[in-house]
Image (cartoon, rainbow, N blue to C red):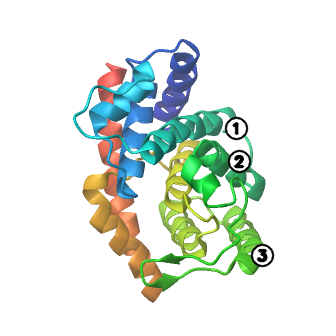
């Protein structure tokens, strides 16, 4: 496991520096941006996402492209790069806010709506029918969450609970799922006992059920089961690039 992750981090750094669009770095960028945005309702296809990453352009389409989808996809690429640049830093509120800034700073709709960018939300928001932490309490709850996380042994159950609690707080006006799933990848990449993974849109229902289970019963069994499945899937995909 340690050797696998050491190889993965090295390849990320080398391929990014070389602008290599044929290896595991590009695969991970495309796959994570596509799936994480798709879970939130993006209309871009895997091919369109790849074109944005590889060429900075979109193929001809008889339908219109939604500007927000394009802007958030580009923002996701930047957020992933910033994650790599800060991989050795301890997870903190300021670092999480910076991830959000990279994701959202180029999104016109969010700025036009007056959403806080790279800062905690200023308006109450909900996840479906579930209320989240009020803006005035977000700072305190995030501090509690991070203090708790840093005190725990870093295993898959801890990571699942951290993610479920983060999503229940919902610290930002928008972009909570995408920043939260980036944190899953980052922390599983950093910690020796974990294997990195990407939550796939094909597993969206299982993911939503896992978050629901935590909200209603404080259990993370479903999330852990999903994370183990995605760890195996991502590892198998990475094996292609290790040949």
Mark 2 and mark 1: span between their CA atoms?
A: 10 Å
Asked if 86 appears above or below 191 in the picture, the reply is: above
| 117 in relation to 13, above or below | below
**How far across and how far down the image is residue 89, in percent?**
74, 43
Asked whether the residues under the numbered discs 1 and 3 touch, taking CB atoms below 8 Å apart as contact, a structural biologist would say no
- How crowded is the residue under tag 3: few (<14 C-alpha within 10 Å), some, or many (20+)? few
Query: Crowding at label 1, few (<14), some or many (≥20) Cα neighbours within 10 Å?
Result: few
Who is closer to the viewer here, 76 or 92? 76
User: What's the mark number on residue 98?
Assistant: 2
Query: Contact (CB < 8 A) between labels 2 and 1?
Result: yes
Q: Mark 1 to mark 3: distance in Å? A: 24 Å
Instruction: State which tag comes first along the sequence, 3 or 2.
Output: 2
Q: In this figure, which residue is indicated by the disc labeled 3?
A: 140
The residue that mark 1 highlights is 86
Q: Nearer the viewer, residue 74 or 35?
A: 74
Q: Quadrant of the C terminus?
A: top left
Q: Secondary structure at mark 2?
A: helix
Percent across and percent down for residue 61 are 25, 32
Residue 135, label in figure:
none
The CA span between labels 3 and 2 is 18 Å
Q: Residue at x 71, y 47 (%)?
A: 98
Identify the residue at horizontal 50%, vertical 22% (top origin).
Answer: 11
Q: How many marks?
A: 3
Residue at the farthest top position? 18
Mark 3 element type: helix
Does 135 sit left or right of 192 as displayed? right
Q: Determine whether, in the image, residue 42 is placed left or right of residue 167.
A: left
């Amino acid at each position: 496991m340690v050797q696998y992750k050491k190889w993965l981090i090295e390849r990320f750094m080398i391929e990014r520096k070389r602008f290599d669009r044929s290896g595991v770095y590009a695969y991970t960028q495309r796959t994570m941006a596509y799936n994480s945005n798709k879970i939130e309702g993006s209309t871009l296809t895997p091919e369109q996402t790849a074109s944005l990453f590889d060429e900075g352009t979109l193929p001809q389409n008889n339908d219109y492209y939604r500007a927000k989808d394009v802007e958030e996809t580009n923002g996701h690429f930047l957020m992933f790069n910033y994650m790599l640049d800060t991989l050795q830093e301890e997870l903190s509120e300021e670092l999480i806010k910076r991830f959000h800034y990279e994701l959202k700073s180029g999104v016109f709709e969010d700025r036009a709506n007056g959403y806080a960018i790279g800062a905690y939300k200023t308006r109450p928001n909900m996840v479906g029918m579930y209320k989240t932490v009020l803006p005035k309490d977000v700072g305190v709850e995030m501090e509690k969450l991070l203090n708790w996380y840093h005190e725990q042994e870093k295993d898959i159950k801890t990571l699942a609970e951290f993610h479920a609690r983060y999503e229940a707080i919902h610290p930002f006006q928008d972009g909570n799922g995408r920043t939260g799933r980036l944190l899953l990848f980052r922390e599983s990449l950093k910690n020796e006992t974990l294997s990195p993974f990407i939550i796939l849109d094909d597993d969206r229902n299982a993911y939503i059920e896992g978050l629901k289970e935590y909200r209603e019963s404080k259990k993370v069994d479903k999330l852990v089961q999903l994370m183990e499945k995605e760890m195996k899937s991502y590892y198998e995909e990475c094996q292609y690039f290790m040949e």
